[in-house]
Amino acid sequence: MPSKSDNQEINQNIDKKAVIVNVAVAVIHHKEQYLLGFRNATQHQGNCYEFVGGKIDANESAEQALVREVAEETGIAIENDIIVKLGRLHHDYGDKQVVLQVYKIELAVQQYEQHKHCEYGLEGQALTWVDKSKLLAGEYPLPAANKTILEWLRLPTQITITYPLAHFSECADSAAAWLQYHQAHLAPESLVYIRIKEACPERSGNLAAQLMHGRPDIQVIVPYGTDSQFVDVDEPMPTKAESISHQVVANHLTHASLMQWFEDAQDLSVSEACLSDSFPLIISCHDIASIKAANKLASVRIQHQLSPVIGIFISPVLATQTHPDTVPLGWEAWSALAQLADMPVIGLGGLSPMMIDRALVHGGISVAGIRQFFNKEN
């Protein structure tokens, strides 16, 4: 039987394990230049770069803490800038657990010019501005909990969704018409969600592979499991998955598949089987229940050291031609749902690329759609 002193030691260890530190993190940037601090060797997770931020006090919100910490550490006043929530991360370092509430702030030209030459912060820490491409390439090592943030930053401000194959049903060869249109009208180097809505997975995979082969400049999101069907039968040698898989940035999980996973997740073996893919996920959500399920899935993927959930579509924001009978959320209700998400939020439904500023103000980081997102000049 444990002694009194043993019990005290066990309780102390439990208390230490239970300590949770809430931290506000500011991903500050101007265009492609991002601000990083450097943690010295004596600090927790030392000899690493980090985004600006600090502990959230008991009497303040995450955004209030963000404004205070950025001012205290760098002298940059961000209270009048648009502060966009990226997401929330829970991470166990062993000696402490942290909850990172992550926000993205783009500085105005005047702010950047005023601070771009500052080599040290107000607390003596080294500061540096780094190019986004080098940051995402891992040239500046960050603490473990920050790795997901880098994946979030890969999302652009707009995502083009392909027309379904049925849109070209009046053409003699609908597949050829679908392929020709999308190869001609997708904007250069765009992120494209290839949504063919074809009942035959092999045919969908074939069309996706042909589009990617013909447009090697684009990056794509494909339906969950589609990447296993990437074989282009029109090539002299079949185009195998590995030859175009570098263009795939994420798999898409539908609302129905998400809720089925959430129901099955009570059985850990089923949960693990669903999470076996190697690509990040983007998930479709429509309500509080699905956002709760997406948050759970994101947490489980991090626990299993799998590629993260990098974003969710919340839709429909506005009325759409595709689903005219669906009641739109409207910006205010959409914003309320966006605040519940633990990952970046993408607006979908009746939007155009010009609406990105409105999405940013309401808590999103990107907009997506079909008709308004194609290059009409070709």
Image (tube, rainbow, N blue to C red):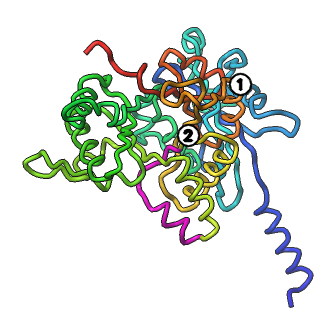
Against 22, residue 29 (above or below) is above
Q: Earlier in the sequence, mark 1 or mark 2?
A: 2
Quadrant in which the C terminus appears? top left
Residue of label 1? 332
The answer to whether 112 appears left or right of 99 in the picture is: left
Against 169, residue 207 (above or below) is below
| Residue closer to the observer: 57 or 85 | 85
The magenta region covers 268-283
Q: Position of residue 357 (x, y in %)?
A: 57, 17
What's under tag 2, amino acid-wise? Ile
* Residue projecting furthest to the bottom: 1
Does residue 273 show up magenta in the picture?
A: yes
Q: CA distance from mark 1 to mark 2?
A: 17 Å
The answer to whether 119 appears left or right of 247 in the picture is: right
Give the quadrant of residue 170.
top left
Residue at position x 19%, y 35% in the image: 173
* Residue projecting furthest to the top: 110
* Residue projecting furthest to the right: 4
Q: Position of residue 323 (x, y in %)?
A: 52, 31
Dot 1 falls on a residue whose secondary structure is helix
Which labelled disc corresponds to residue 312? Answer: 2
